[in-house]
Image (spheres, helix red, strand yellow):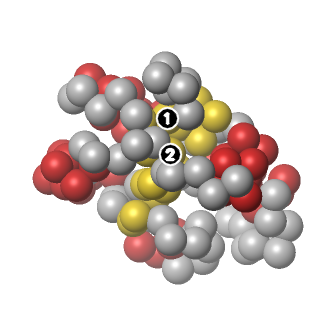
């Protein structure tokens, strides 16, 4: 990514980054019952309310792509992380739902 990390990326952009082997961390802020339905491979799963207690785990990410179901919770978390000085945080627009509908159509949806 460039030195200016965008506030939001599309599922297509994330897919291109993953296929290119770019260094990034996917932070999934959904609840365990949501993760049981579907999730992205190798994601760091920390429910939204637990993010403040895990802030130190997130500081070193070169690029931190924050994911939820539709992109609303992850947008809030991205904004909060940026306020805490984690400028590498970016929201996944449309969340896991868009990923399942546009990138991995074999993934379960809810």
In the figure, 2 relative to 98: above or below? above
Furthest residue in direction bottom, as rendered: 36
- Residue 61 at x, y percent in the picture: 35, 47
* Image quarter of the N terminus: top right
Q: Residue 52 carries which label?
A: none
Left or right of residue 76: residue 72: right
Tags 2 and 1 in contact by the CB under 8 Å rule?
yes
Camera-nearest residue between 109 and 43:
43
* Earlier-in-chain disc, 2 versus 1: 2
Left or right of residue 22: residue 52: left
Q: Please tell me how crowded label 1 is: few (under 14), some (14-19), or many (20+) other residues with Cα within 10 Å.
A: many
- Residue 9 at x, y percent in the picture: 64, 34
Q: Name the residue under label 1.
A: 90
Furthest residue in direction top, as rendered: 4
- Residue 89 at x, y percent in the picture: 42, 36
What is the spatial separation of the Cα atoms under label 2 and label 1, in whole angstroms? 5 Å
Q: Name the residue under label 2.
A: 65
Residue 97: in sight, yes or no? Answer: no
Q: Residue at x 51, y 52 (%)?
A: 23
Left or right of residue 108: residue 45: left
Q: Which residue is drawn at 28% across and 46% down?
A: 60
Q: Please tell me how crowded label 2 is: few (under 14), some (14-19), or many (20+) other residues with Cα within 10 Å.
A: many
């Amino acid at each position: 990514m460039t030195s200016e990390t965008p506030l939001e990326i599309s599922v297509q952009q994330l897919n291109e980054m993953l296929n290119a082997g770019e260094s990034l961390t996917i932070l999934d802020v959904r609840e365990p019952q949501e993760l049981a339905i579907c999730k992205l491979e190798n994601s760091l799963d920390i429910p939204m309310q637990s993010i403040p207690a895990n802030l130190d785990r997130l500081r070193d990410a070169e690029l931190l792509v924050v994911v939820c179901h539709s992109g609303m919770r992850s947008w809030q978390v991205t904004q909060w992380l940026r306020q805490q000085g984690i400028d590498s945080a970016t929201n996944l627009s449309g969340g896991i739902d868009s990923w399942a509908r546009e990138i991995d159509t074999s993934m379960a949806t809810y």
